[in-house]
Amino acid sequence: MKSVCGLDVHKDSVYLCILSEFGELIEKVFGVLTYQLEEMRDLMLHHHVVEVSMESTSVYWIPIWRVLSPHFKLNLANPYFIKQLPGRKSDVKDAQWIAECTMKELIRGSFVPPETIQQLRQYDRRIFDLNEEIVRKLSKLDAVLQRCNIRLSNYVSNVDSKSYKAVVRAISQGITDPEELVKLIHGRIIKHHGMDVITASLKGVVSLAEIDMISQLRDELDMAEAHKEKCQARMLEICEREFPEELKRLQTIPGIKERAATSLIAEIGTDMNKFETANHLASWSGLKPRNDESNKKIKSRSITHGNVYLRKTIIECAWAASRTKGCFFSRFSYHQTQVRKKNKMKVLVAVARKMLIAVWHVLHDNTIYIDFTTDRKTSRTKG
């Protein structure tokens, strides 16, 4: 007798509904502590449940998935997809509706990577969070310097430059004399703006409170940088141990280096059988234009929602690839922006999509990247 189960997952409770092929219905509410999840698992095993579906509710589904995955076929369903299925959703409970959809094989499971890739994802997304924190701390640090009327940020390329950091370190140690601080500025900056201008930008009124604030913010920045380096080192260690060949092959694509390669592996894994074609991967990442056309009128061609972290990584790679001399991506970018006068940002998204297609083929075909040239004809072999 086939039985399926639907789970409505919340922060502090899980609503369970077991549905047999003969229409028998079992409903029960469980807590989310480990022993309570094990009791729920035992109940499902007792009723011969073979398939379980649940909604991807924040991160609350992850511990439930870990407890149930060795025993059942699991489906992680997009809540939006379930709500689009026709039915009397207002008259049935969520878990019962999920169980009915599972019984009728209407649930299409989302991509859930294996445990190793999930560990890589934790490190990768921690790095994204740390990058945002570093940007925020740098902004606060510059605000403190502006309060002291130290205007160095007006004359350096960015507040993360070596000269700027050296000046901040000196001020945090109590050195406020502009004649001493100007010695820490790179000669090219002084040559470009003039010694008098740079010296004047370093003259301000710095109190003890501001020195303490600058010192604390600098310590927080150093800690965030150290944590970021530790996460990246751990990601590289896992990739070199588990996916050494894939890591090397991804770096043959222009614009993709070590950090980007580890991030791509963390977000999409190395098994491309999860994505039937390269277009499926592009759609999953949100880089595929939406199909919004009615009465022969195109309403929108903006990209869709998808994996935000993957999209950020591949678009950063597209920036680098569009500036790499002699590769297809830079030639494509130049032709679209300079010859056809297309919008730079839209072209960048197109380059990112083409790069993601290349990533799929490199991982799927176990091959290195071969740059496209007009004088090289490609041939397809049947097989």
Image (spheres, rainbow, N blue to C red):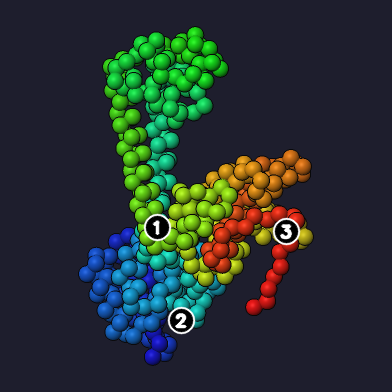
302 is higher (above) or lower (below) than 78: above
127 is higher (above) or lower (below) than 27: above
Decide if residue 291 is in sight here.
Answer: yes
Q: Residue at x 29, y 76 (%)?
A: 41
Q: Quadrant of the C terminus?
A: bottom right
The extreme left residue here reads 35
Q: Position of residue 345 (x, y in %)?
A: 64, 43
Q: CA distance from mark 1 to mark 3?
A: 33 Å
Which of the marked residues, 1 or 3, is nearer the chain's N terminus?
Answer: 1
Q: Callout 2, which amino acid?
A: Met
Q: Residue at x 48, y 67 (%)?
A: 271
Q: Position of residue 63 (x, y in %)?
A: 32, 64
- Which label lies toward us, 2 or 1? 1
Q: Which residue is mark 1?
A: 240
Q: Dot 1, crowdedness within 10 Å: few (<14), some or many (≥20)?
A: some
Q: Which residue is mark 3?
A: 376
Which of the marked residues, 3 or 2, is nearer the chain's N terminus?
Answer: 2
- Mark 3 element type: loop
Q: Dot 3, crowdedness within 10 Å: few (<14), some or many (≥20)?
A: few
Q: Position of residue 6 (x, y in %)?
A: 40, 74
Q: Callout 3, which amino acid?
A: Arg
Q: Residue at x 68, y 76 (%)?
A: 382
Q: Position of residue 158 (x, y in %)?
A: 49, 28
Tell me where residue 356 sits by quadrant: bottom right
